[in-house]
Image (cartoon, grey):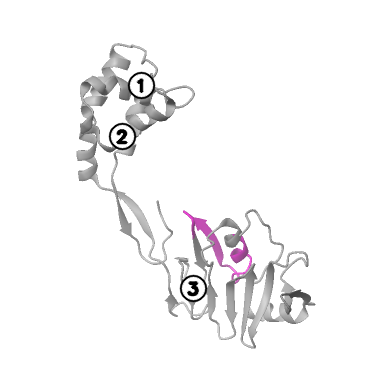
């Protein structure tokens, strides 16, 4: 689905969507011998954003070929993105949710804020279904369990200790002695690979190779790096995280 599309319409209820379908003059488009009844939600030039009648009790807000928001007469509502969890899809859904609801894109996952429960629900690959948008006790189906990253302090400490000897060498060379780190004698790709290999298996690098590793770190980027920046980078990359589940209704965290 395309990125950066703006929508100049607002749908907020089944009755409004039904009325919009009835009042909108269809654009009859013929494709493959089949006539399609297209009724745009907004501008008639934006046929990719349209209302579709499924039956007398069901209407859908369609973005391209995806029924992103489907309203039912009995108060049920269904959301889906068919794998297109993008800003465009989020923006379209946000224009079609009930009044006081909203859609956000957080870490490539669409969150639906439901005003009647004052909670967030994450959309997955299966349709996210609210059985009754007026009843806060009604079942919500297929909501993805939100998670956040939590530092595993014990494992992170063990991992960081593997870099102590190198960081002692680097600090002595750069800060204590104040010596300029020589530029790597190899190509950018090779010394970047040295840095990555060192971060993966630091025990494979003995002290006689530390200057090559330090050169790979110090000469990253246009202006290079100081010891403090190198130390911070290694500590960050050596941090180990666990993924912790949050209660349904929470926003997805890092």
Going from the N terminus, do you reach mark 1 or mark 2 first? 2
Q: Is residue 116 above or below residue 159?
A: below
Q: Which residue is mark 3?
A: 127
Callout 2 crowding tier (Cα within 10 Å): few <14, some 14–19, many ≥20 = some
Q: Which residue is mark 1?
A: 215
Which residue corresponds to the image point at 72% horizontal and 62% vertical from the top-left?
8
Going from the N terminus, do you reach mark 3 or mark 2 first? 3
Q: Secondary structure at mark 3?
A: loop
Callout 1 crowding tier (Cα within 10 Å): few <14, some 14–19, many ≥20 = many
Along the viewing direction, whichever of 212 and 219 lies nearer the viewer: 212
Count numbered badges in the picture.
Answer: 3
Q: Which stretch appears magenta? A: 91-109
Q: Which residue is mark 2?
A: 197
Tell me, yes or no, if residue 84 can be seen here: yes
Along the viewing direction, whichever of 119 and 167 lies nearer the viewer: 167
Q: Is residue 95 above or below residue 58?
A: above
| Rendering quarter of residue 208 | top left
């Amino acid at each position: 689905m395309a990125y950066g599309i703006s929508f100049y319409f607002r749908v907020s209820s089944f009755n409004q969507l039904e009325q919009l379908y009835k009042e909108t003059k269809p654009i009859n488009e013929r494709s493959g011998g089949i006539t399609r009844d297209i009724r745009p939600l907004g501008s008639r030039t934006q046929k990719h954003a349209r209302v579709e009648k499924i039956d007398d009790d069901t209407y859908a807000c369609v973005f391209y070929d995806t029924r992103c928001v489907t309203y039912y007469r009995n108060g049920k509502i269904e959301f889906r993105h068919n794998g297109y969890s993008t800003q465009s899809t989020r923006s379209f859904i946000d224009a079609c949710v009930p009044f006081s609801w909203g859609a956000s894109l957080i870490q490539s996952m669409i969150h639906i804020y439901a005003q009647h429960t004052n909670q967030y629900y994450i959309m997955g690959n299966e349709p996210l279904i609210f059985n009754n948008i007026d009843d806060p006790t009604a079942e919500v189906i297929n909501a993805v369990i939100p998670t956040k990253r939590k530092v595993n302090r014990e494992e992170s400490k063990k991992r960081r200790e593997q870099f102590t000897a190198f960081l002692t060498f680097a600090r002595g060379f750069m800060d204590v002695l104040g010596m300029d780190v020589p530029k790597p004698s190899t190509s950018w790709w090779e010394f970047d690979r040295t840095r990555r290999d060192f971060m993966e298996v630091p025990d494979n690098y003995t002290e006689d190779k530390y200057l090559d590793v330090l050169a790979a770190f110090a000469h990253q980027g246009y202006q290079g790096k100081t010891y403090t920046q190198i130390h911070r980078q290694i500590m960050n990359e050596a941090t180990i995280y666990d993924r912790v589940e949050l209660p349904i209704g929470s926003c997805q965290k890092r």
